[in-house]
Image (cartoon, grey):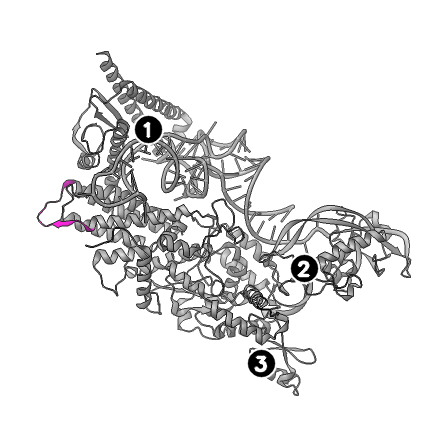
Amino acid sequence: MDISSKYNPAEVEDKWYARWLKNRFFHSEPDSREPYTIVIPPPNVTGILHMGHVLNNTLNDVLVRKARMDGRNACWVPGTDHASIATESKVVAKLAAEGISKEDITREEFLKYAWEWKEEHGGIILQQLRKLGASCDWDRTRFTMEPELTKAVVATFCHFYRKGMIYRGVRIVNWYPKALTAISDDEVIHKDTKSCFYHIKYYISDGKGKPTDKYLVIATTRPETIMADAAICVNPADERHRWLHGKKVLIPLIDREIPVIEDDYVEMDFGTGCLKVTPAHDAHDYEIGLRHNLPVLDIIDDHGCLNEKARILVGEDRFEARKKIAALLEESGNLVKTEDYVSPIGYSERTNAVIEPKLSAQWFLKMQDLAASALAEVEEGRIRFIPDKYRNTYRHWMENARDWCISRQLWWGQRIPAYYLPDGSVVVEETAEKALEAARKINPGITAADLKQDEDVLDTWFSSWLWPISVFDPELPGHPEHKPNRDLAYYYPTNDLVTAPDIIFFWVARMIMAGGEFMNEKPFSNVYFTGLVRDNLGRKMSKTLGNSPDPLELIAKYGADAVRLGMLLCSSAGNDILYDESQIEQGRNFCGKIWNSWRLVSGWTADEGAAQPEVASIAVRWFDSLLSKTIETMEDHYSKFRINDALMAVYRLFWDDFCSTYLELVKPAGGKTVDKATLEATVEFFDKLLKLIHPIMPFITEELWHLAGRRGETETIMFERTPAAGEYDAHLLESFDVARECVNAVRGIRNQKGISSREEMSLYVEGDLDRSLLPVLKKAANLSEIIDGEGSGAGSQFVVGTLKCFVPLEGKVDMGEERTKLEAELEYQRKFLAGVRAKLSNQAFVSHAPAAVVESERKKESDALSRIASFEEALKAIDNQSNK
RNA sequence: GGGAGCUUAGCUCAGUUGGUUUAGAGCGUCUGCCCUACAAGCAGAGGGUCGGGGGUUCGACUCCCUCAGCUCCCACCA
């Protein structure tokens, strides 16, 4: 059969992916089989493939392909996420590059640009996934902002609003001045940041707005907010500040009078024990303000600049204002001192911009009930996390979940379906028409033009949490009375979810909540958390470091199968992945190995009449057993999501056992013909191996499966069944390993003595070895004869287990060297024996340890004794020789 | 500040209820090989007192305590 001498992944991969698509092999429809469902963690619609995606989607694909070959109706639903903040900021940047400012255009115009951009760049990542071999059901591709899914999101909002779980409130939120939007707590990262602690004098007022000569000192890191102070707060138990109770003080520079209040919140031993309370610019202060009924004065605008309410430094950026006010305070004599200080500051996870705690009106979803039931799903074991340790993290969060701020001050996203009447009252309805209807019940005179829809959009996660439901039946979310359609009824709950642990709360937890709310059923059974992909120095991959390779270039260079294997090689669940290109090289090499092994086998021609050599017959029986055993091992690994262990098992089976051992044993000596039975068995083994490898490396296995079976274009390995583990001969496997060790030892001696593998040798064996395996020894070690008995004279002695072996080495043996080697062995065995005997002579051990353990120690003892005897004899023999 | 986890060969990691483990794998390293499947390969070899200390136990990489180092998550002491 013609087969190119080198495997060409690019050609093969493009060919097969196109055929798979053409035949719609990935497409799934409900039928009588058991479903296996995965929904993709939807990547950002404008994103491009990075190594994290490669890891995640490779794992997904392995699971899906495995399930498909297990005979299940596998469905992997792909799609993308509209990613409001990320996408909007990209569009804003693009417009800015064209000289267009978002503020100069209308919402409609902006959205037009955004959609254009999405159409142009959106979904590139889905094309890229095809290169990786992802077997997604592309006919089911979804986008979180497509009309149907948007309807689902809006309906969901209305649903929770009607249940009284959504409310609008003025709260301190994490304000992101650059994008002019609030972001959720989860999108803020706190980092210890060097800053400055300003100690500032506030003079006591004489009651008429004039300073007395008495003062208190507060310490703050944010002097630019003093103009927004509503009070000074001290701990009521703090004796030092008792004299301040009931007093009023004047804010420096602007001389506004504020009260001194008392609250337990203030730590006596921190700072000066006096806290300036700035309800508009600090969440704790806001709480204190509520308790003490303090006025709220917001002096920072949406861009992070001081506004006119600050009275001074109006229009200055918050950081500029901080520098300037420090100078002003210094001038006015209010600055006592400054000291270096490190404090946690919130940054945007996305852009690293400093987040401003800011008072603003936002929509919230109450979390308490949702979180409690979502916690139970995991705690009571209905949903399994892999690795298990994430349960702790999950529990902690769910027990402390705060209400979810679901509004975002953006345009790209699902607009909040709240409509305001001129009198300020609000109606929440799925459509503008329904809203008008509802509004007229409040005020019959209302016209459509009077109703103003809320300007905000919903947090992206407010759509992605519906994903496992809405991709199948977008009618259901928000309408729990709706009967699930055929797809949803069949595919839900999905089986496994593969995702990164950093979105455990953003997404995983919330999908569980939505599942409980609308389906009364968990959305998936297993969540496999991958690690973060890092470079080989352990650094996160980032554009700025330039340490993030382009997966498509890697695929072009090494092939998708190689990239997949390379990623899986280093990935055990939950551990970070230290990526190194050498792993992908290893994948490429494995492809080469598989390819070449078939080149070898395909070159064999069967000789109908020839009898099967004994060594081939043994090899076939042995490999058949080993194959069964390995399949069993792999199934066990898969069931525990130990994908890389399953991979390693088949990798070694193929390379070490099939190629290096089996093929070498059955390989016809002259390179000409092989008996029929052996050839058939070999081809069948190869076929099974391909099937075992297919979920991991889909392309090369499909190619070879076709080459090996001369199969038609509409056939595919992907619907073949996973080979079943049959019975295996444990005794054969064990004794075969002894034989292999012997072979190893002989080869070692060859190596050491510089004897070519082509030169035949003799071997003496004495002791425990299955003699039926002698042909294996003979062929693998290239022995002319194996003599049962004790060898003597010039030669080298070694022991495998309790088997004593001797290789005659006439004229090639250095007796001194042999002596040293044997003495070292003897020394080791004696020490070992001493250890075992110490154990056995310990009465406590003998009486407490289980009989089997004691028995095995006894066996160790007798084995060691026999080995020692062998070595001693060998040494004696050497001495006799040299004495001659 | 709270919580979780990690520390095993040069590197990355297994080690599944403490005893057939005299601690394994992959990669890398070293030695020898182009023998017609494969040098992206073949055949071998070396390499670890399982982070330190203590304890429980007949027995500890495995359980407990403690110290050290690292990582992650949560947390706005101004």
For image coordinates 65% across by 57% down, the residue present is A354
Identify the amino acid type marked 1.
Answer: Lys
Chain under label 2? A
Identify the amino acid type marked 3.
Answer: Ala
- Callouts 1 and 2 close, C-beta under 8 Å: no
Give the mark nearer the N terminus: 2 vs 3: 2
Give the mark nearer the N terminus: 3 vs 1: 3
Span shown in magenta: A602-614
Residue topped by disc 2: A356
Report, in whole angstroms, how far the alpha carbon at label 1 lies from the one at label 2: 70 Å
Residue topped by disc 3: A432
For the residue pair A618 and A415, the one nearer the viewer reads as A415
Q: Position of residue A851 (x, y in %)?
A: 35, 33
Q: Quadrant of the C terminus of chain A?
A: top left
Would you call the spot at circle 1 few (<14 residues within 10 Å), some (14-19), or many (20 or more)? some
A293 displayed left or right of A7 = right
A221 displayed left or right of A810 = right
Would you call the spot at circle 2 few (<14 residues within 10 Å), some (14-19), or many (20 or more)? many
For image coordinates 29% across by 27% down, the residue present is A863
| 3 vs 1, front mark | 3
For the residue pair A878 and A299, the one nearer the viewer reads as A299
Residue A878 to residue A104: above or below: above
Residue A860 got which mark? 1
Q: Position of residue A109 (x, y in %)?
A: 57, 75
- Residues at marks 3 and 1 on the same chain: yes
A695 displayed left or right of A122 = left
Q: Position of residue A742 (x, y in %)?
A: 25, 32
Farthest residue in the top direction? A883
Res. A525 image quadrant? bottom left
Chain under label 1? A
The reply to whether residue A724 is visible in this rendering is: no
